Amino acid sequence: MVDFALPEEVRKIQEMTREFARQEVRPAGIALDRVQDPEDAYTSDTMRRVLARAYDVGFHKMNLPKEAGGLGAPPMTNIIVQEEMAVADAGLASHFLVAPMIAGMAATANGRHPFYREYLDAFVADTRGAHSGAWAITEPDHGSDLFQFGQPPIHMDTAAVRDGDDYVINGHKSAFVSNGWMADALLIMVSEDPGQGMEGTVTFAIPGNLPGISRGKPLDKLGLRGLNQAEVFFDNVRVAPEFMVMPPGPGYRLMLERIVTGGNTAVGTLAVGVARAAYEEALAYARQREQGGRRICEHDTVKMTLFNAYRRIEGARALLWKSSWLIASGQPHLPTAMAARTMASDMAVRVTSDMVQIFGGYGISKEHPVEKFYRDAKLLQIMDGTNELVSLKAADQLIG
């Protein structure tokens, strides 16, 4: 029998996260959203302060195992924390989502390059937000076709060529590398054997300051300002083989699908958080705003709009919890994750739009945060693949 009751430990983490997110993350997210130049936003005192406070509390290491220096939070904690953070600000929630990526891999590095142990130790001890990771996979000409397996003409343009004992990497990743501008460690996927197509991809986890690595300007976006995204360039970057996480071959596909399963579940959770934020704002407003001699929440159209928002949020969350439970129990299921993500992100765009409508003219004013939630929601239909592409991929998996 499925039990939706949270364990006491997880419930306490939820309450702590909710309080921290409302007091620290929400005002920081609003402030960053209003900074015109994204580079100014990411170098601002606001950004430094919110990262330092989050790291000081331990959000960055919450799901790392205790034996690696993490907090060893129980299963399902991730999805609870992600939603509460996203209610406050989906951009910063996205940053906290990708930041531990390399540290998590370092925790299972099993004696590979000394960098892994050194990085993990520095990451778990970090109280300033100085250390974070990024996943550099998307390229200017290779985004949605990353799943085109068995087609040799389609392969990564960024390439790793063996030179003596090392690999030399040249090329660049597109401006959509989440946390690409700030990360000091990178998970990169590049072509090593183009004759195998995407199956010829090799995966490395490397320091972000190796000679030859540079970053483009952070992307200026419609929403999710709290998440920095930028191009990453590789100019004769020499990488030792000990940095290899996965060689070319069938393992790459399995690894990619596992990452994408978790990633789609996370993106869907961000969407639920954004929709919930807009719903909570609109509900509070509707309870106090009067028109026609009564509160607008008593008007049937507003009442039904609020109920439909509640219904859609609860339904999307339930499917996301199923996907998260499957991952936590060692049964990750990509179609379920993709179904949950597309349902949640489409829902978030619909709900945030409806909540702007409840505010009327005030809904398009920056005096209220619902217009920001509306902009943030749109990006979640595109992040980690457009909903159309993601849906087709899930359909392919279902029919075999």
Image (cartoon, rainbow, N blue to C red):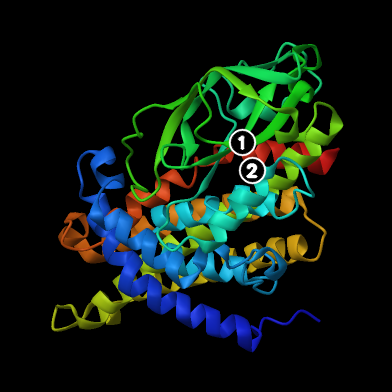
Q: Which image quarter holds the C terminus?
A: top right
Q: Which SS class for mark 2?
A: helix
Badge 2 amino acid: Phe
Badge 1 amino acid: Ile
Q: Residue at x 64, y 43 (%)?
A: 115
Left or right? Give the position of 83 relative to 302: right
Which comes before the other along the chain, label 1 or label 2?
2
Write down the residue under mark 1.
206
Q: Residue at x 56, y 61 (%)?
A: 124
Crowding at dot 1, Cα within 10 Å, few <14 / some 14-19 / many 20+, comes out as many
Left or right? Give the position of 361 relative to 253: left
In front: label 1 or label 2: 2
* Viewer-closest of 386 and 270: 270
* Residue 106 at least partly seen: yes
Quadrant in the picture for residue 365: bottom left
Q: Position of residue 158 (x, y in %)?
A: 60, 18
Q: Which SS class for mark 1?
A: strand
* Viewer-closest of 182 and 359: 182
Q: CA distance from mark 1 to mark 2?
A: 8 Å
Residue at the outermost bottom position: 8
Q: Position of residue 278 (x, y in %)?
A: 35, 65
Q: Please report contact status of discs 1 and 2: CB closer than 8 Å, yes or no.
A: yes
* Residue 268 at least partly seen: no
186 w.r.t. 157: above or below: below
Write down the residue under mark 2.
115
